[in-house]
Image: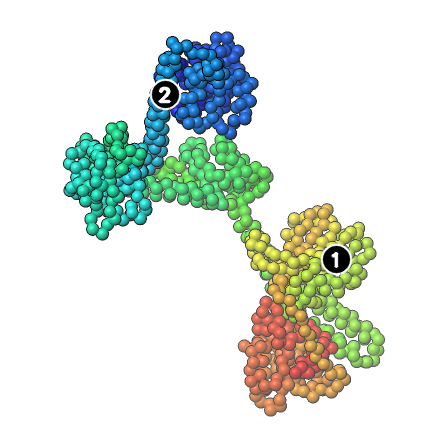
Amino acid sequence: MATILIADDSFTNREFLVTLLGYGGHRLLEAADGSEALNLARAEQPDLIIADILMPTMDGYEFVRQLRADPAVTQTVVIFYTAHYLEREAQALAESCGVAHILFKPSEPEEVLRIVDKALGLIPSPAESTAMSSTPIGPELEDGAAFDREHLRLLTDKLSQKTNELRAINQRLTALIELGQQLVLEQDSHLILEKFCHASRNIIGAKYAAIGVLEQDNQTLRHFLTSGLDAEAGANLGAPEIERGLIAQLLTEGRTIRLRDLNGEPESTGLSAGPGAVHHPMIHSFLGAPIATSTRLYGWLYLGNKIGAAEFSEEDERIIATVAAQVAVAYENGRRYEKIQHHADELEREVAERRRVEHNLREAEAKYRTLVEQLPAISYIVAYGDTNQTIYISPQIESLLGFSQAEWLADPDLWQQQLHVEDKARVQAEVERVDQAGEPLNIEYRMWSQAGQMRWFRNQTVPVRDETGQIRYIHGIMFDITEQKRLEEQFLQSQKMEAIGRLAGGVAHDFNNMLVVITGYSELLLQREPPDKERLRHYVGEIHKAGERAAGLTRQLLAFSRKQVLQLEVLDLNEVVINMEKMLHRLIGEDIELMTKPATELGQVKADPGQLEQVLMNLAINARDAMSGGGKLIIETANVELDELYARQYIEVSPGPYVMLAVSDTGIGMSKETLSHLFEPFFTTKEKGKGTGLGLATVYGIIKQSGGHIAVYSEPGYGTTFRVYLPRLKDTIEPVKEPIPLEPETASAFETILVVEDEAVVRQLVSSVLSELGYTVLEAVNGSEALQICQQNSIPIHLLLTDMVMPGGLNGRELAKHLEQMYPDLKVLYMSGYTDNAIASQGVLETEIEFLQKPFTALALKRKVREVLNAP
């Protein structure tokens, strides 16, 4: 026989060829790549080489090229063994390197054997056959030729038989390999039995197969599975009887049973399931084996009706016995697995408490770690001793001070180095004191970050003592209170401004009453024509002008103190800016360029238009004074949304939609010190006599009273920007103004007016002005006296003109309520130097209230009284 070398990187392909060619008695060598094959060829010098073309390390083409280059093996016959899709390439390669034979995968065994025999010269080529047929054969060779032909026929029959056997072996091997792969991944005992049942039928080649496994009592079926029946029959087929028939024989004898020529009736085989159930198909050949181990019988495995034969073979019987033994082992392992799982469950329960405790401990530790590392604070631990070394610092040290944990722990002096110089002595003294006393530390101080930012911290510590009472550790936490300190500073500033405002409001209230007298009587004198009238008019005129200036001052004080009365209207800030543009041009002068940038689709606000004009004018004047050498004044509007982040920076701001009015200049700018006092009344950076210091204080008061917010940004040399934010209305409103018709001032008045004012000089002035117009005037000092007058007089009262804040228990609003019950058609006009909650909320006048702001002129009094009386 020949020595054949098989070179293929596929183990399956090599195994197929080795098995197939091994039946022919050939000596077979194997190589997984071209390099290994070349070494074997040189060492063994085989008669034939079957080589794949595509291999790792060295492919078939290179292998043949080097083979032909070696004189020792250059004449070795080679067969290329490759895939069908490489047919054209394989033929080209074969021609180029002198390979005469090609096998294509997959090839039938007959084709492989034919090509191998042809390559080995066992089958003559067509040329040789022709030569032989053309050469006369002598009588002495005829018997030899006949012998050869008969021998060839026998070989062919034997080869065909072996090929069929090999095909069957290949099918069984494939089924066993698939079964092994499936069982590796499967743990469910029922599915394992199901796979064995199907595999057994395929391995043996039977039409039907069934597996039955009993409970421990060996009487009750635990599992029963079939293969080869259709789905409906398999589902309705009952289990066979175990007390008689073939199954009983299997269980009783405990060995394999192989039978043929059965009549096939279920009644005789015992495979019937009883009345009502689907009958088992006819059985002519039977092969069964018990499923058992050395210690226990579990059940049975049987096959029915051999495919392609009348009976099962001895080889089938050996295989089914092996499979049944494997089923027993697999099932027993499954049972052991269940026991192991049961013990594992018990073990799991035994350690459950420990696991729970460990889990809770880890969870508590994780929560503590998460809490510590997410706090806006630095946690630390100090080992107490001579050096007090820090042994732990939380990661927040990097985000708050810019140092890594390693840097901080490596330098014990870093904490003292970063202390603010103004706080260092105080902090060190306090640390030494609590250290000696063994007390907790609670102190606030400033520290510098690595980037040069100053931050405020509140440092709190707790000493941790051992069982002897000695301090072992110091646990501390440094809270970042920088934002808190900033808000405290804002709050204190706000309180200061509020206190100054209350003082200013009180001064303005008393001052207003005096101004009413000064301006009122001077106005009356100016309307007379006394002797030496020119000089007298000059004197009185100066008194009147001084009163007007004083009135302006009180209006500014009231604006700052938020005690003035606002008469709100729905406004478009763009219209306010446009209406004031010409006046602002005149106000700032020609050397300053005025630029306006009104926003499109600007939202509406609700504010007092006169007060907003005052705000704009004051900001423009402030900008003008900052640009003595000329520059640009930029006024712009916009819709903005103030978010939570912005609102947290200012304690009086609520997040939401606003309309912004920005006034910017390119002037000299302001320092931080100036900015800190900017809105305080009487604070000014101008020369003496050049300003009152109430301009920006007035702006501040008006914006706050209007429910808004003002912010300023400035740097020396880069100008200043004021941004005013007023709440934006949700819906667009078209304001409707209905003018009240006024009667001519010369018309005679006939109505009765009750004047209630606790300041005598103001009351007398008001009464004088109204009396001269023809009104009947009744006077009262307070609300109680006014009620008495009304109860004692039968004259109907048409108008109540009353101050708001009066002694005697009743304010103006309460008095009006009493009198409206007595006089249903009574008109009410309030007068006051500042407002309170009796007629206004936060200084905003209620829509149904008629109000006259002190100080007022005689002309304003006349017109307002006539307006209220004429109102429907």
* Residue 782 x/y as whole percent: 59, 79
Numbered label attached to residue 596: 1
326 sits left or right of 636 in the view? left
Q: Residue at x 15, y 41 (%)?
A: 244
Task: Pick the residue in front: 848 or 200.
Answer: 200
Q: Residue furthest front?
A: 139
Element assignment for label 1: strand
Disc 1 residue type? Thr
Q: Look at the image and tell me in which quarter the N terminus lies.
A: top left
Residue 456: x and y in percent read: 53, 45
Question: As displayed, is residue 499 above or below residue 186?
Answer: below
Distance from disc 2 to disc 1, alpha carbons, whole Å, reads 115 Å
Quadrant where the C terminus sits is bottom right
Residue 215 image label: none
Which residue is at the far bottom? 794
Q: Amino acid at mark 2?
A: Arg
Disc 2 vs disc 1: which is toward the camera? Answer: 2
Circle 2: is it few (<14), some (14-19), or many (20+) Cα within 10 Å? few
Quickly name the residue at label 2.
153
Q: Indicate the quadrant where residue 295 lies.
A: top left
Residue 182 visible here: yes
State which quadrant residue 827 falls in. bottom right
Q: Is 666 or 323 nearer to us in this picture?
A: 323
